[in-house]
Image: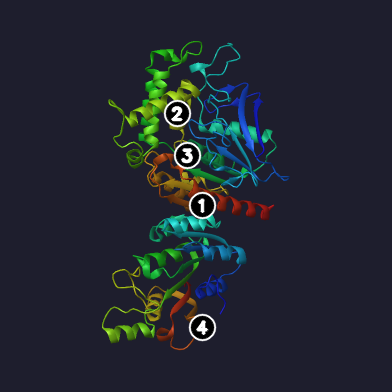
């Protein structure tokens, strides 16, 4: 598989909050080859804690992207970039503010899902891709896929929003707020100015532990841990969560956690109705959709996907929808590979064929 | 009689549908008919199917299928966005057939309905001789495990069309793979109706 990694730099990016970020960098990776008429590009959109490394060893969607896989890199050119506000190569609160020479920390402007997408669009333009064959992602990646289809309908032939929502519910915001409060309650957080010292590792790891609980299901936790003990005074599940929490601290910035979860919470595809209803948003959309939800996902329940699908159908958009049986909760979108592979492969192939016929 | 995926009612439907039209298939199963229509008639097709495993196969085939129940599925679409709404071998399984039929003619200019004819003579004989719920090649189930919850004959559908003021544009009756013209209510296994609002 041909793999490339790079960082693109842009002079400026205007943000929803009204400020302009200048300059801005975006880290990306690509897999496979762009064909001659540039019609086989797919943008993979990572979830909250992901990064540009989508495929290959340790890639967050390695089970789905690669030669012969769902996003077949023998046929398609798959691109993935780290989101704005992130901490894995793209400009975020841990980056240096050129005006002060110090990390932005909490003076970093607030970012939105739409801002992330605007930066991705700049990257696509920079790479000379006029129209994407598809945008695809789960969870927060799915929000970006929806935003892409609504903001740049001419630039996206197909969208695959998976295990996602058009807006966070109170429950989803609540869990994110617990995470943020855990970070801010850590004395090492120092109002975000910890870059020269010790990061708020305890707070960040507690935040991650809460996150992991919401990604699983009662059934998958019973199956994976039950009441098994690791030590006489420690349950297996306690040890697992602590391990995942401490591993997360090594690769994630606490301030990015705060900024990105806020972007997710404030995301509303209709922008609180100022863009119109969900259905009216899809009025001009000619993008094909494949929407997938999972039966045991209680963090992004199926009804949220069905709401999107129902709005799409009310405007007679081309939408395929499947509520896949799974017991893995929200994690299913990363775990249920075989069933998603068939869906994604068939959907992409027919989109590619229709696109070629149109051209 | 030409066949599509081994089902002659599909072949009939394939002939009823004009090329390059918009088609909604209710209870589309694994999307065989839609895929065939897309390939051979260049239709813009959509499907609705309740069973997850079938939806997966249909999407994997490249057909845009929505997982949901058809009673409520027809409600979401705007009026008259399809040229045809198809209901093959599903009418007798729906909880509220009239709602589905009316919904079809709300979202589509024409409806194509194919159903097994409960007036077929072996059904009548089976019931008459055994005194039990009829079991035939066409209706092979026991009364307790049948997916069919409404039983109708060719005459029943004609009567409904009259009372609902639908125009029956075409009626095609099949016995096996052969077309039946005489005494369809007795001889037809499958009835296919092309209806529109008059």
Mark number, residue B127: none
Question: Which one is closest to the eye, mark 3 or mark 2?
Answer: 2
At horizontal 58% and vertical 25% (from top left) the residue drawn is: A89
Q: Earlier in the sequence, mark 3 or mark 2?
A: 2
Q: Residue tagged by mark 1? A: A319
Mark 3 and mark 2 on one chain: yes
SS class, disc 2: helix
| Display coloring | rainbow
Q: Residue tagged by mark 3? A: A270
Quadrant into which the N terminus of chain A falls: top right
Task: Please tell me how crowded label 3 is: few (under 14), some (14-19), or many (20+) other residues with Cα within 10 Å.
Answer: some
Give the Cα separation between the discs numbered 3 and 2. 19 Å
SS class, disc 4: strand
Mark number, residue A261: 2
At horizontal 52% and vertical 40% (from top left) the residue drawn is: A137
Task: Please tell me how crowded label 4 is: few (under 14), some (14-19), or many (20+) other residues with Cα within 10 Å.
Answer: few
Give the Cα separation between the discs numbered 3 and 4. 55 Å
Mark 4 and mark 1 on one chain: no
Is disc 1 in contact with disc 2, using a CB cutoff of under 8 Å?
no
User: Compared to B121, does B113 lie above or below?
Assistant: above
Q: Residue tagged by mark 4? A: B178
């Amino acid at each position: 598989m041909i793999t490339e990694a790079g960082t693109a730099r842009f002079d400026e990016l205007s943000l929803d909050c009204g400020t302009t970020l200048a300059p801005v960098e975006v880290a990306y990776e690509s897999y496979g080859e762009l064909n001659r008429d540039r019609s086989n590009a797919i943008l993979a959109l990572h979830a909250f804690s992901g990064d540009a490394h989508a495929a290959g060893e340790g890639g967050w969607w390695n089970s789905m992207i690669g030669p012969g896989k769902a996003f077949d890199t023998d046929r398609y050119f798959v691109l993935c970039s780290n989101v704005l506000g992130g901490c894995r190569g793209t400009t975020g609160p841990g980056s240096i503010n050129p005006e002060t020479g110090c990390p932005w920390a909490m003076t970093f402007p607030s970012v939105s899902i739409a801002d992330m997408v605007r930066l991705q669009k700049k990257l696509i333009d920079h790479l000379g891709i006029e129209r994407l064959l598809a945008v695809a992602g789960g969870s927060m990646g799915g929000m970006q896929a929806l935003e892409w289809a609504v903001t740049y309908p001419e630039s996206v032939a197909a969208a695959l929003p998976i295990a996602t929502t058009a807006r966070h519910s109170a429950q989803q915001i609540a869990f994110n707020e617990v995470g943020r409060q855990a970070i801010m309650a850590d004395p090492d957080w120092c109002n975000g100015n910890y870059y020269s010292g010790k990061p708020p590792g305890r707070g960040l790891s507690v935040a991650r532990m809460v996150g992991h609980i919401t990604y699983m299901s009662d059934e998958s936790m019973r199956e994976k841990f039950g009441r098994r003990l690791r030590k006489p005074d420690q349950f297996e599940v306690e040890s697992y969560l602590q391990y995942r929490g401490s591993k997360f601290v090594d690769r994630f910035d606490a301030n990015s956690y705060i900024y990105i979860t806020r972007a997710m919470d404030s995301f509303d595809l209709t922008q609180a109705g100022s863009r119109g209803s969900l259905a009216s948003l899809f009025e001009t959309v000619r993008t094909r959709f494949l929407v997938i939800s999972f039966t045991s996902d209680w963090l992004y329940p199926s009804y949220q996907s069905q709401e999107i699908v129902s709005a799409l159908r009310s405007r007679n958009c081309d939408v395929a929808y499947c509520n896949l049986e799974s017991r893995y909760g929200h994690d299913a979108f990363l775990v249920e590979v075989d069933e998603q592979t068939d869906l994604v492969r068939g959907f992409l192939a027919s989109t590619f064929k229709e696109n070629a016929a149109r051209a | 009689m030409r066949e599509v995926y081994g089902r002659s009612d599909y072949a009939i439907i394939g002939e009823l549908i004009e090329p390059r039209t918009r088609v909604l298939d209710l209870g589309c199963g694994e999307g065989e008919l839609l895929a065939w229509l897309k390939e051979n008639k260049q239709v813009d097709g959509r499907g609705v199917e309740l069973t997850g495993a079938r939806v997966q196969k249909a999407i994997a085939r490249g057909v845009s299928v929505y997982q949901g129940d058809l009673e409520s599925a027809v409600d979401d679409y705007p009026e008259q966005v399809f040229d045809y709404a198809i209901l093959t071998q599903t009418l007798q399984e729906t909880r509220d057939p009239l709602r589905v039929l009316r919904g079809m003619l709300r979202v589509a200019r024409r409806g194509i309905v194919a159903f097994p004819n409960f007036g077929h003579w072996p059904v009548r004989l089976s019931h008459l001789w055994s005194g039990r719920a009829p079991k035939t090649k066409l209706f092979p189930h026991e009364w307790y495990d049948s997916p069919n919850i409404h039983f109708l004959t060719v005459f029943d559908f004609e009567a409904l069309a009259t009372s609902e003021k639908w125009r029956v544009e075409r009626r095609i009756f099949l016995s096996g793979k052969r077309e039946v013209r005489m005494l369809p209510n007795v001889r037809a296994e499958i009835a296919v109706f092309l209806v529109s609002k008059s």
